[in-house]
Image (cartoon, rainbow, N blue to C red):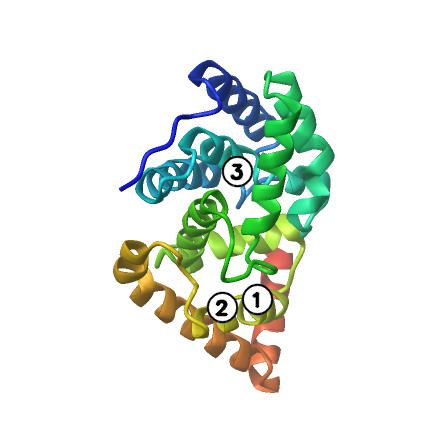
């Protein structure tokens, strides 16, 4: 395990945490999936992965805290959509411009839809934490419906998104960068992606589509 001297002090990290926590509470109804429960999980896991791989743990923590502010700017958007708000938050909390720019690059680099095999240690730590949240066995059961509501997606659209963005990365062997994370969580990830592949196939079946339409009609009447 390598260690690296931090470039951000704990007071600044705490300031970013308080600012993002406040936004998550203020906009909790909009952030049903990407709210504080998600941010705090990713932050804790990312810091642990950073300490293991020798990345700057404080920089990774701050990147985790601001990695999903794009969902406050635009529904179902890429990380880059949150750049202006992200940099604004970091500036308000005293993060130097050079470090803020680095953090923004880490967030972009770690994004599932576009990340590659050879990314920075900081992006690896953030990516592994965010990926783990996706791969948790409880996520499809407890949180998937929240993602649908938050981003205005249908189940079909979400299934196609997950399979399209994640299966190739998984099959090419860098779903997780940290070897221990891969050893511990790959079984969950494989099961999760198999589930979403089955969902993708099911929702494209006309009879299942009729079933879902009937369920949605009942939900509409109940509301």
Q: Nearer the observer, disc 1 or disc 3?
A: 1
Name the residue: 36% across, 55% down. Answer: 138
Q: Relative to the observer, which residue lies in front, 12 or 223?
A: 12
Relative vertical location of residue 172 with respect to residue 60 in this rendering, above or below: below
Name the residue: 69% across, 48% down. Answer: 75
* Mark nearer the N terminus (1 vs 3): 3
Residue at the disc numbered 2 = 169
Residue 38, percent across and down?
A: 46, 41
Badge 2: residue crowd in 10 Å (few <14, some 14–19, many ≥20): some
Badge 3: residue crowd in 10 Å (few <14, some 14–19, many ≥20): many
Q: Secondary structure at mark 1?
A: helix
Horizontal placement of 164 versus 118: left or right? right
Whether label 1 touches label 3, CB < 8 Å: no
Whether label 1 touches label 2, CB < 8 Å: yes
Distance (Cα) linking label 1 and label 2:
8 Å
Whether label 2 touches label 3, CB < 8 Å: no
Residue 35: assigned label: 3
Distance (Cα) linking label 1 and label 3:
22 Å
Q: Residue 175 is drawn in which quadrant? A: bottom left
Name the residue: 57% across, 40% down. Answer: 67
Distance (Cα) linking label 2 and label 3:
25 Å
Horizontal placement of 98 versus 61: left or right? right
Residue 169, percent across and down?
A: 49, 68
* Mark nearer the N terminus (2 vs 3): 3
Residue at the disc numbered 1 = 165
Q: Nearer the observer, disc 1 or disc 2?
A: 2
Q: Relative to the observer, which residue lies in front, 58 or 76?
A: 58
Badge 1: residue crowd in 10 Å (few <14, some 14–19, many ≥20): some
Q: Secondary structure at mark 3?
A: loop
Q: Secondary structure at mark 2?
A: helix
User: From where the camera sits, is residue 29 visible?
Assistant: no
Residue 198, percent across and down?
A: 46, 78
């Amino acid at each position: 395990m390598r260690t690296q001297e931090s470039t951000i002090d704990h007071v600044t990290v705490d300031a970013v945490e308080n600012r993002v926590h406040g936004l998550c509470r203020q906009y909790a109804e909009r952030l049903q999936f990407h709210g504080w429960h998600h941010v705090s999980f990713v932050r804790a896991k990312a810091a642990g992965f950073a300490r293991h791989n020798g990345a700057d743990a404080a920089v990774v923590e701050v990147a985790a805290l601001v990695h999903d502010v794009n969902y406050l700017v635009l529904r179902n958007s890429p990380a880059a959509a949150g750049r202006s708000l992200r940099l604004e938050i970091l500036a308000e909390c005293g993060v130097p411009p050079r470090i803020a720019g680095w953090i923004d690059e880490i967030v972009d680099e770690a994004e599932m839809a576009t990340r590659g095999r050879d990314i920075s240690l900081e992006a690896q730590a953030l990516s592994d934490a965010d990926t783990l949240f996706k791969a948790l066995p409880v996520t499809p059961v407890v949180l998937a419906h929240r993602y649908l509501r938050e981003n205005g997606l249908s189940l079909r659209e979400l299934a196609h998104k997950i399979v399209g963005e994640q299966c190739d990365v998984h099959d090419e062997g860098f779903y997780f960068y940290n070897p221990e994370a891969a050893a511990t969580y790959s079984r969950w990830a494989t099961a999760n992606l198999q589930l979403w592949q089955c969902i993708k196939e099911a929702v494209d079946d006309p009879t299942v589509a009729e079933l879902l339409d009937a369920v949605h009609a009942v939900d509409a009447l109940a509301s």
